Image: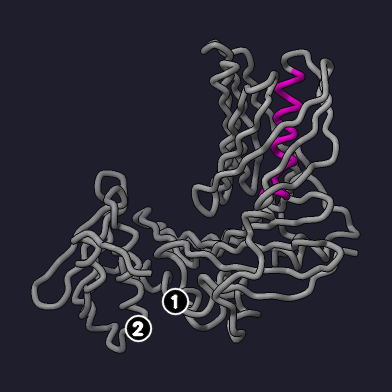
């Protein structure tokens, strides 16, 4: 889709004929200097708006160059650049592995299923969990009956409290591929709203909430690395902190009867994966593989979430590699992918897979063959 670009973005997109690349440390952060064409240069650090775009353009041009030896680089930069470009088109990077089965398929440009509808359905357990916790904190009981789906998957929750039975309308609003807000009406009393803000990241999940009507604010951060999981929750009423707790998120085992299903759903090897169970019975998966040479430490990450209810499953998966020069500490991110999968009806078992843009660090075969494409296959839960 065409759009207006600022002058620096236009300049970077027109870089050609690389002459020299230099990656260096600028007061504790990565920076890149590029010399190209006839005496032209571009110099940005990670704090600059278009640093990622500059790295993307440089890696793209270098990987395609037939005269790589003519491009001047110091040994440290050359080590990073060559490792970052390693495996492009050779099916050896973790990203290509994730998309390998689809690389020769003709993906569809338009999805058959609107993923937003199914995100609404699959993530309702998060909302119910926080509503129960908030009611409990206020010494009130709440029970939910079966959901009633409305227009575009928005929901009406029927809740029975210690005082009455009420309808709680639920409206979703999507900010981007990984973040959305959810407004629930009739919270605590009629015409009292509460809004939840939910953001999925590769190794963490953020949930915050606010109700101006009830003067309640709070936030939870779930940090889910391969080695340890933690959750921190803070709640304020009338700007006074009334609750704060930091807890471990413990690893768990997947039901053995479902392991093959989850392996296929996330394209991940559960035998080398740490699995966390979140309080609303969703799962986070974390796998990493590390390789080292004399100069380079490369860590390949593979993480994912599965949210579901009785009928729908929504999965998201991230993979990327972090390449570090052990002598200089300089690093570059590469081999990026973000995959979303929807099973609209477990009984029917049709799986929709989408590959989303992740920026400069995705490989060129990913960008050309998979990005913004939709693929379909059958998957059955035993």
Name which quarter of the figure residue 81 lies in: bottom left
Q: Nearer the viewer, mark 2 or mark 1?
A: 1
The residue positioned 70% from the left and 62% from the top of the image is 342
The residue positioned 60% from the left and 86% from the top of the image is 104
Q: Quadrant of the C terminus?
A: bottom right
In the rendered view, does 86 fall on the left or right side of 236?
left
Q: Secondary structure at mark 2?
A: helix
In the rendered view, does 41 fall on the left or right side of 163?
left
Q: Which residue is mark 1?
A: 364
Q: Residues within 10 Å of mark 1 (few under 14, many from 20)?
A: many
Q: Main secondary structure of the magenta part?
A: helix
In the rendered view, does 309 fall on the left or right side of 336?
right
Which scheme is used to colour this image of the protein?
Answer: one colour
Residue 37 in picture, x, y percent from top left: 14, 77
Q: Which residue is mark 2?
A: 64
The residue positioned 58% from the left and 47% from the top of the image is 200
- Magenta-colored span: 120-136
Q: CA distance from mark 2 to mark 1?
A: 10 Å
Cβ–Cβ under 8 Å for marks 2 and 1:
yes
Residue 274 in picture, x, y percent from top left: 71, 51
Give the residue at the far left of this rendering.
39
Q: Residues within 10 Å of mark 2 (few under 14, many from 20)?
A: few
Q: Is 75 or 320 nearer to us in this picture?
A: 320
Q: Sequence-wise, which precedes: disc 2 or disc 1?
A: 2
Q: Is 81 or 223 nearer to us in this picture?
A: 223
What label does residue 7 carry, if any? none
Q: Secondary structure at mark 1?
A: helix
Q: Is residue 181 visible?
A: yes
Q: Quadrant of the N terminus?
A: bottom left
Q: Is 350 or 80 nearer to us in this picture?
A: 350
């Amino acid at each position: 889709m065409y759009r207006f670009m600022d002058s620096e973005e236009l300049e970077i997109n027109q870089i050609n004929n690389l002459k020299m690349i230099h990656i260096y440390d600028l007061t504790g952060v990565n920076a890149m200097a590029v010399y190209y064409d006839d005496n032209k240069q571009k110099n940005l650090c990670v704090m600059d708006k278009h640093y990622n775009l500059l790295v993307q353009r440089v890696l793209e041009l270098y990987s395609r160059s037939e005269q790589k030896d003519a491009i001047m680089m110091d040994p440290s930069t050359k080590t990073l650049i060559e490792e970052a470009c390693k495996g492009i088109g050779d099916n050896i990077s973790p990203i290509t592995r994730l998309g390998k089965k689809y690389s020769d398929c003709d993906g569809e440009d338009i999805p058959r299923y609107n993923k937003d509808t199914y995100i609404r359905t699959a993530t309702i357990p998060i909302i119910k969990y926080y509503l129960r916790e908030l009611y409990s904190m206020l010494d009130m009981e709440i029970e939910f009956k079966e959901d009633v789906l409305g227009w575009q998957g928005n929901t009406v929750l029927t809740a029975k409290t210690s005082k009455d039975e009420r309808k709680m309308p639920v409206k979703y609003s999507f900010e981007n591929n990984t973040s959305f807000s959810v407004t629930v009406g009739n919270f605590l009393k009629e015409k009292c709203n509460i809004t939840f803000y939910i953001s999925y990241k590769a190794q963490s999940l953020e949930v915050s909430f606010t109700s101006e009507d009830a003067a309640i604010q709070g936030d939870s951060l779930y940090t889910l690395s391969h080695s340890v999981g933690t959750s921190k929750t803070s709640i304020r009423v009338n700007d006074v902190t009334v609750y704060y707790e930091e807890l471990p998120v413990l690893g768990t085992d997947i039901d053995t009867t479902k392991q093959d299903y989850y392996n296929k759903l996330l394209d991940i090897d559960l035998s080398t994966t740490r699995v966390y169970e979140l309080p609303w019975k969703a799962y986070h998966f974390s796998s990493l593989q590390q390789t080292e040479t004399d100069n380079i430490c490369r860590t390949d990450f593979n993480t994912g979430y599965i949210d579901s209810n009785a009928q729908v499953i929504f999965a998201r998966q991230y993979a990327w590699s972090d390449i570090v020069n052990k002598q200089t500490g300089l690093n570059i991110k590469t081999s990026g992918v973000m995959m979303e999968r929807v099973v609209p009806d477990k009984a029917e078992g049709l799986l929709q897979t989408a590959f989303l843009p992740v920026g400069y660090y995705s490989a060129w075969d990913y960008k050309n063959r998979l990005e913004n494409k939709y693929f379909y296959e059958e998957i059955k839960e035993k």
